[in-house]
Image (cartoon, helix red, strand yellow):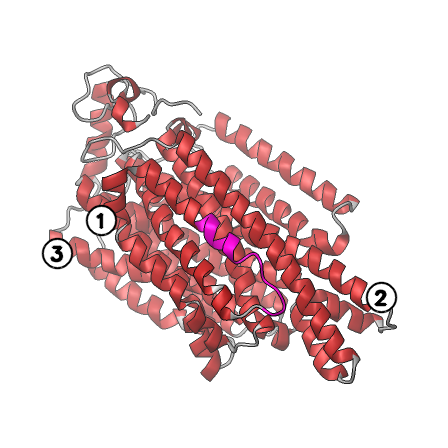
Amino acid sequence: MAGSVLPLLNGRMTSRMQAASVRMTGEDPSPSRRWLALGVLCVSMIMVNLDNTVLNVALPTLVRVLNATSAQLQWIVDSFIIVYAGLVLAAGSLADRIGRKRTFLAGLVVFAAGSAWAAFSGSVGMLIAARAGMGIGGALMMPSSLSIVTDMFRDAGERQRAIGLWAATSGLGAALGPLVGGLLLSRFWWGSVFLINVPIAVIGVACAIALVPDSKKAAAQRPDLAGTALSTAGLGLLLWAIIEAPLLGWSSGLVIGVGLGAAAILAIFVAWERASSHPMLRLEFFASRRLSVAILSNGLANFVLYGSLFLMTQFLQFDLAYTPLQAGLRILPAAGAIVIVSASAAVFVRLAGTKITVSAGLLIIAAGVWVDSSLSITSDYGQVVLGMILFGAGAGLAIPAALESVMGSLPRGDTGVGSATNGTFMQVGGALGVAVIGSLLATRYQGGVTAAIAPYRIPHAIHSTILGSIGGALDVASRLGGTLGPLLAHAARSAFLSGANLGLRTSAVIALAGCLIALAALPARPPRRDDPATPGEPASGEPEGTEPSQAAPSTGE
């Protein structure tokens, strides 16, 4: 990638006028109000991230109650992410244009409505649709909340601490989701894992109206509707091909055709963004290695975390026979590692620099999932807890450091679009993690179970249930009894673990690749300035007319 930062646009004077126009449209809250507003934003993002992982611990319950197959479980998880990732860039642009506070409030309301719909869904299809609706709310909330944080804290040190707290609480929500889900499922019906969002969102709206300042970009461009449609369609088709391939066959003409169509649509999307006068994906931002490599690092970290958690929550319940609450409690060590390490990630960045911190975090993630990739039918919790602690600690180290690198490299007027770009890559990484690792699991599982039951004459309907998910197979095995029941249960667990190991090893390789990329290409340290530069405006202390990459080699750009 090019090592230069954003090119000069219209000269230094124009840049200063643009920066001034941004400042005139934003409130300047007192220090105490800033930190209270940060608390409101953090709690709201805990809710969004908690909802993603609270669902994971409920997946086995959905298999039993709604008869969901493995592919349907992937769609229940990914329907939220597809919509979220497809809309978040346009939402960031909308936030810059109409105001970040009102966009954030609208997101809270939509998320609450989608959560209520999901809670009372009576079928898998209805739940998938409701999750997609929640994705709209999440897309409106994430970029607006992060850009509000960046706008409120203009001192580099304060901004780093604030973004670290924002990232830590987001990680806290993701880590505590399984525990909260387990508690709710132990006392209430499965819909409670969604309904809990409604009162939190209502309180969040009331507090945000009173405390959160508003800001927007005076000269913001209109949302890129064509780009939004192209990106959503391309990502949706790509995930469809990956998720449905184990059922239809990887060599299926339909799967291959849809996959090629997705690639073509995404290529058209990139071409459109290059030509558009109001792109939602600002490709010029990626000229900065500080931004582009950090975004890639976050996407790869999410790929591993979402995919691994998708596997581990099922392993704890289906193979170790834990209840949802017991499974949630056993994920707490990973939650604690994320929270503790995230809170101190800024210290590691100051001591070792961004490059080393992000690379070390990804390496620790790789080590953690590799440790857990040797599961067998005799494995117990003690053999997986170390790996969970390691990948939780790695995520707590890498993601906040990379996130601060992204936000610190953005011009203040474009933090909505920039943070949305980062959010898009993180969500796409998470969606691909669930789709790819879930499909590897499904392919290996179906192959193993098919071979095991081949000698037996099993009715087609039961055969489909067995191949659909390990939960379905275990349910059939419990009803069969006799000699065949235990044999089927053993075969299903063995096949599931074989697929899980393949998925986890793939995750480890991907995390290691991310580590090497960050080590090779991520700048060592951020620029020394108090406010992210406006495009075309050199960082503080650089000679006029000199690009930062030439004047400040210490930044690594």
Q: Is mark 3 on a helix, strand or loop?
A: helix
Q: Name the residue under label 1.
A: 161
> Image point 61% across, 49% down: which residue?
239
For the residue pair 267 and 334, the one nearer the viewer reads as: 334
Contact (CB < 8 A) between labels 2 and 3?
no
Give the quadrant of residue 461.
bottom right
Drawn side of residue 342 relative to residue 392, left or right = left
Q: Is mark 1 on a helix, strand or loop?
A: helix
The crowd level at tag 1 (other Cα within 10 Å; few <14, some 14-19, many 20+) is some
Q: Mark 3 points at which residue?
A: 32
Q: Name the kind of residue labelled 2 in the image.
A: Ala
User: Is residue 297 shown above or below 528?
Assistant: below
What are the residue bounds of the magenta stretch? 365-378
Contact (CB < 8 A) between labels 2 and 1?
no
Give the quadrant of residue 155.
top left
Judged by depth in the image, the label closer to the viewer, 3 or 1, is 1
Extreme-top residue of the structure: 545
Judged by depth in the image, the label closer to the viewer, 2 or 3, is 2
